Image: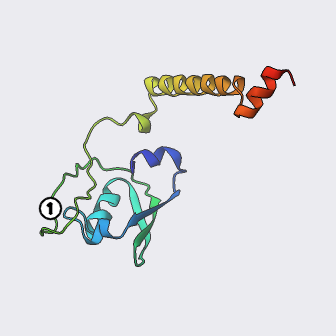
Amino acid sequence: MLLHAHSYLTPRGYLYIVLPLPCLTNSRYLSHERLTAILGSTGWDVVRKHDSARLTYWLVRRSETGPDGVEWKREQVRTGAGRNNFCLVRRVRSLPFLARSRSTADSLSSLAAGRQARLAHRARRPLHRSLERQERQGR
């Protein structure tokens, strides 16, 4: 999703990330330093970060260089039995949402057509049972 967010923002746009604090402080696979490195590798510059009692807030800006293509695997940062398993991974592969290929445009248009069909179906059926009864009684 960090890579996918590039397609929604302007060239130097901001992204606000909020995570539960234990995702960074109590994780086997992620720390503040590792998240900073992952964000940099996926094309984000950390502008500001703040930890509250339960949440961690990150304001990042889309970098001018973009993603660098480094693969991030599930590597243990901390040991211990009481740690959670939250991690961020990045596999190197083609990213159709960054290139906006023809197949992606086709799939988006088919999704939109399906949504329009569902909305049309909802418009035909009554919204509430009492309205349905009124229609049957001819009111």
Q: Is residue 9 above or below residue 114?
A: below
Question: Against 35, is 99 above or below?
Answer: above
Query: Which residue sits furthest bottom?
Result: 53
Q: Residue at x 14, y 61 (%)?
A: 76
Q: Residues within 10 Å of mark 1 (few under 14, many from 20)?
A: few
Q: Is residue 32 visible?
A: no
Q: Give the residue drawn at x 52%, y 22%.
A: 110
Is 67 left, or right, of 106 in this rendering?
left
Residue 4, quarter of picture? top left
Is residue 37 something one can see in this rendering?
yes
At x 20%, y 61%, the residue is 29
Question: Along the line of sight, which residue is nearer the eye, 133 or 115?
Answer: 133
Residue type highlighted by circle 1 = Gln
In the image, residue 125 above or below residue 74: above
Q: Which residue is mark 1?
A: 76
Quadrant in which the C terminus appears? top right
Which of the two residues, 32 or 98, is positioned nearer the viewer here?
32
